[in-house]
Each structure stands twice: as C-alpha cells, then as structure tokens.
Amino acid sequence: MMRTRSRAAAPDQACVAAVELAREAAEELAAPSPVGEHLGVEGEGDRIVTHYFACLDKSYRGWRWAVTVTRASRAKKVTVSEAVLLPGTGALLAPQWLPWSERLRPGDLGVGDLLPTADDDDRLVPGYNESDDDETDHQAVFEYGLGRARVLSAIGRDRASRRWYSGDHGPHTPIAHAAPAQCSTCGFFWPLAGALKSEFGVCANEYAPDDGKVVSADHGCGAHSEAAVTPPTFEQPVPILDDLGYDDLGSVDGDSEGEELGHS
C-alpha cells in the first residue's frame, strides 16, 4: 500500500508581492500611529495570503497588524480582503471571559443586588422530596409549608463545611494555633443545630475577632472564656544592703574588760 503525502500549495506570488498594498491598509487602521516592519507572510489558501506588520503602539506591545490580501482566479489585480490587529508572542491579553455568575466572589454582592440561583443548583433540593439523607429529610419535613421551596442538600452542606473548615475561622490559622484552648470548650461557643452541631458553632463573645461568625469547634482565640492570665514571675535582685548577715567581731572576756565596756 502506497502512502501519499499532501503538500501545501505554495503561496500565491502576486499576493506575496503585495507588501505595499497590505501596508497601506494597515496604516489606514493604525493612524495616527505608524506601522512597523514587515514581519512575514502566511498562506491562507488558494490566492489568499496574510501579511504581518509590527504594531508600534505602546498600548499594544507584542501585537501585530494582519492584512489578508487575495485575487480572483485568472485576475492580476490583488485586493485587500481583511485587516485586523492580532496578538503575537508575549502580547498582553485580557483574562478569559467568564459569565458574571462565575466571576462573583464573597463580598461582591451589594445593597440592592440580586443573585438568582439556578433551578439545577446541586446545593439545594426541593423541600417536598424525600432523600437518602436523614438530616435533609428532617429539615424538609420541619420546614414544609413555611415558604421554603428548597432546602440545603447534602452536597451543599458538605461544601459549606469544607469551606468553613479551611477558611479563616477554622483550626489552621495563626490565631487558632496560639489560642489557649479550642472553641468547643469556650462558654461563648454556641453550637449549630442539625448535622453540623458537632463541628461548628457561632462565636458569641463581643470582644473576640470572630464574634457573630461561624467557627469550627477546634478553632480558638485569646478571648476564650476560661483563659487565665498567669502572674509574671520576677527574679529577686541582689540587695544593695545586706541586713540579714552579720560580722564576727571575735570573743569578749567579761571579767577583764567589763569596766571598759561599761559593765559593773
């Protein structure tokens, strides 16, 4: 069996030679900025060639002007088909476009802003459906008829749990490592209800940095209810005047020296 190689057709020489025609089209778009040197050509198809020119605009460093020229079959005249500005190697590009719902970050929602939730959001389940999760079913039965069409699903609960635990109010933070004890032993720790009560609670200490926030049971801070301040210990300085010692003045004979000492 013989294999044949497909060879790309050579670029049309008339189109390749139309450098000045392509430059004029690029200059018309770039005005009043000048157009840089000719960077080369690229064959796009039968009698279709694209010329590239350097872009000298400081706002578009790394970009290049691309002018596509062509000619009709059996025609000698070359005409401009398209002229655009394209990014080259190292060009500064805008970040990839994302839908607004994916660009949102915590704290972006302001007063009066609305954030619709998709019908197929896997963090929520209908409040009237039974599931295999006891906590979700209990929540749905308890809330049925109270105006909540959907309740938190097991997936939504697990995502929130991982997000809270790995965040600033979890155990892996400098303030938690330096805390005298964990939040689970603090009197200001108010456990959450339901399946998360053993893992999370709300801090109710107005002087704590996490007041009013959900914290993990093994989080902690210096405002623990049982934190005790150990009195500082000081080393006794060396006394300037030693009033505890005494000087040995030797023995005194009372019979021979009694009169001199004023004794009778």
Image: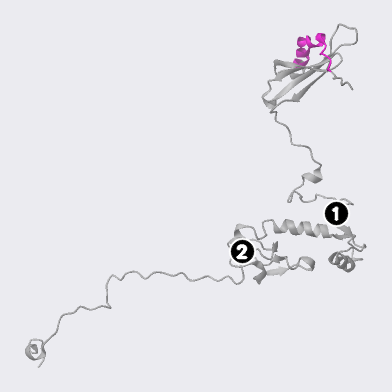
Q: Position of residue 229 (x, y in %)?
A: 53, 70
Q: Looking at the rendering, which quadrant does residue 2 occupy? A: top right
Q: Nearer the viewer, residue 207 or 231?
A: 231
Inspect this view and state whether residue 89 appears.
Answer: yes
Residue drawn 83% across the image and 60% down it: 154
Number of other residues with Cα within 10 Å of mark 1, as a class: few under 14, some 14 to 19, many 20 or more: few
Q: Position of residue 61 (x, y in %)?
A: 68, 25
Q: CA distance from mark 1 to mark 2?
A: 34 Å
Q: Nearer the viewer, residue 5 or 251?
A: 5
Q: Which residues are magenta?
A: 7-27
- Callout 2, which amino acid? Cys
Q: Position of residue 66 (x, y in %)?
A: 77, 20
Q: What number is the disc on residue 221? A: 2
Number of other residues with Cα within 10 Å of mark 2, as a class: few under 14, some 14 to 19, many 20 or more: many
| Image side of residue 243 versus residue 162, left or right | left
Q: Taken as a whole, is the magenta stretch helix, strand or loop? A: helix
Residue drawn 76% across the image and 10% down it: 20
Inspect this view and state whether residue 212 appears.
Answer: no
Does 205 lie within the magenta span? no
Does 23 lie within the magenta span? yes
| In the image, farthest residue toward the bottom | 264
Q: What number is the disc on residue 216? A: none
